[in-house]
Image (cartoon, rainbow, N blue to C red):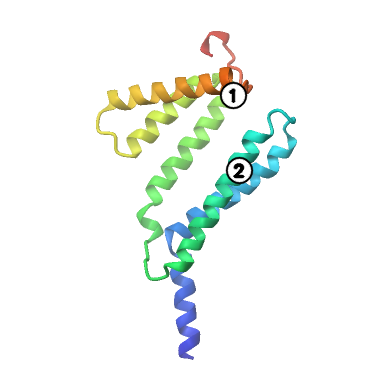
Amino acid sequence: MNINSHSCAEIRSITSHSDTWTGLVLLTIGLTAAWLANDFDTISRPYPLALGIIMAVLGLIIITRVFLNKGNHTSFALHSKVAVSAGTIIALWILTMTNGLGYIIPTFFMEVAFLLICGFQKLYRAIIVASLISGISYMIFIVGLGVRLPEPFLSWLL
């Protein structure tokens, strides 16, 4: 009976650990992205496929670390506000990017929001960093890699 209650406590500890769920989400999204990458043409496929595989591997590493470090317990409730905020921001980014605002504007606002969530104290610094990230990523995708990004409904929006 003692062995059984001990194993139930370990399972409860592992499933209530925030990294378990973070790892499972990364693993699931990564595998889904890798699977969906098969529908891309041969030129566009390697980038989303590689990102999906990397996400899945990172998720697996996080889950493995939870199993190896059973004694370190972190409550999921501690990080739930950040997780919900980040999920909402990503959903809005995808929604706005795919419904006519193109790449630059949604990416800029997503970056500002993430930087503020991550602890940037000054809004003007978050705006500067978000501008740099959005501009550089746009140049890398369009100029460097030739990736087709969502088209804005107004051509001057980029």
- In the rendering, which numbered label is found on residue 66? none
- Label 1 vs 2, first from the N-terminus: 2
- Residue at numbered disc 2: 52
* Residue drawn at point x = 38 percent, y = 32 percent: 113
- Could you give the CA–CA distance between mark 1 and mark 2, rounded to whole angstroms? 23 Å
* Residue drawn at point x = 50 percent, y = 32 percent: 92
Report the residue that reaches farthest toward the top: 156
Residue 67, position as x, y percentages in the image: 48, 67
Residue 155, position as x, y percentages in the image: 57, 9
In the picture, which quadrant includes the C terminus?
Answer: top right
Residue 3, position as x, y percentages in the image: 48, 87
Going by the image, does 100 lie left or right of 82? right
The kind of residue on which mark 2 rests is: Gly
Going by the image, does 120 lie left or right of 147? left
* Residue drawn at point x = 55 percent, y = 56 percent: 60
Q: Secondary structure at mark 2?
A: helix
Number of callouts: 2
- In the rendering, which numbered label is found on residue 99? 1
Q: Is residue 32 above or below residue 60?
A: above
